[in-house]
Image (cartoon, helix red, strand yellow):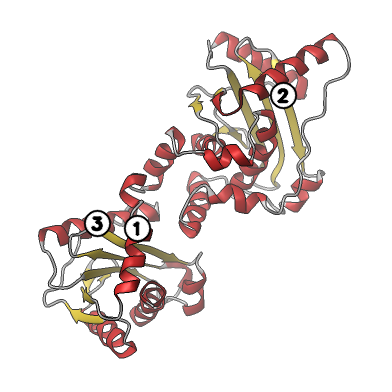
Amino acid sequence: MSFAESEIMKTLLTTVSRFRAARMCLVLLAAGAGVLPVAAAPQAGPEAEAQQKRLELMKSKGPDLKLTILPVSLAGRSWDRVTEVVGLLLEQQGLKNIELGKKPFEPPATNLNGLAAAVGAYVKSNSITNGYALYAEFNGSQQTGLTDMRAVVVDSDGAAVWTNRLTAEDEDFKKAGNPDPLTLAVLLVERLKPQFGLDAATAKAAKPGKMAAIMDERSGLPPADQRSALPDLQQAMKKAMPGASILVYPPRIDGATTSVLSGSNVVRSLNQAGWCKAIQAQEPVLLKASLADPNELKALWGIATEFRDYVRAHPPAADYALYADYFFNPQHADQGFVHWVVCDRKGDWVVVDMQNSHHPDYQAIGIISRDRCDQLLLRRLEGYLK
């Protein structure tokens, strides 16, 4: 497997786009994991009793617990993207006060107890006073994949509160198959939840916070308040059909040109199907949103934002306006996408839809031509209009 940053983000962003909300990834990926065991209790003795008291105190704080997440180590290297994912998943379970450590912790080669002591010394020397600190590492190599996870929580005095290790020999690790960083992040959070006093009730009450804002910025998503009206507007559009009108602009092809032929094809197909009153735009519009960023969500929302602004400046003589963005490789069906946007006559987003090789509708059609992009657009439109 690859530990490249782009692959980590691709895994996360695919999950986000497919289920339309990042909080779904914890539910969906953890669903098959079964009941995860908590860390084994330390050996009996005064230190074990003291650690147990520290653990009970931490649990009692629940969602108000203050936590600093030290940079997560992935195959021996700190990755801020993975650290952010762990923070997001904990926030989705109800944890309110999360900070992300900036300075990487470089652990010595030692056992779990030695690791806990090293983390504690690091926390004391770096004056991390935000209640508790979490350090996690996902170990492996390019050749073996990820084979081991270790995690430590210490308090602000550097005293160990909770330690845990999961290896490829453990049943939960085996159930995950060949886990990627996101899967291990989910397994880690599932183990942390009871230690932090988090449960189904705290998850239900959770609200997007600092971690969600960071992930929105990373992903290219606009702020949540700009997207919150989409479901209601989609329902209103569906109820307005088939009598409502949609102005269809020729789609952009490979970021460089537009296809009047595709625009005509979509208009004709919509009218023949009777889903709406489709109207062909008289003048093509070549939007300029860049495709240079490897983050596909940024490309999607870039075109969505530019089209929204265009519609607001040029109100359509129709109830809705549609613009699509096609990219395809005739030799490789997995190297394309179909992005499309519907705005109402005021310029508000109604639909912002992304289809690529991770999505079933895209896979079913096999995008290798402009015509097949048209087919996919029409298939997706049907679900929103009927």
Residue at image coords 23%, 84%: 264
Which of the numbered marks, if any, corresponds to residue 207? none
Using the image, determine if residue 33 lies above or below residue 135: below
Q: Which mark is residue 230?
A: 1
The amino acid type of the residue labelled 3 equals Ala
Which mark, by number, is residue 289?
Answer: 3
Q: What separation in Å lies between label 1 and label 3 (alpha carbons)? A: 21 Å
Residue pointed to by mark 2? 162
Which structural element holds mark 3? loop
Q: Is residue 285 above or below residue 369?
A: above
First-in-chain label (1 vs 3): 1
Please provide percent x and percent y for residue 23: 52, 47
Disc 2 or disc 3, which is closer to the eye?
2
Alpha-carbon distance for marks 2 and 3? 48 Å
Q: Label 1 is placed on what type of residue? A: Leu
Classify 10 Å Cα crowding around label 1: few (below 14), some (14-19), many (20 and above): some
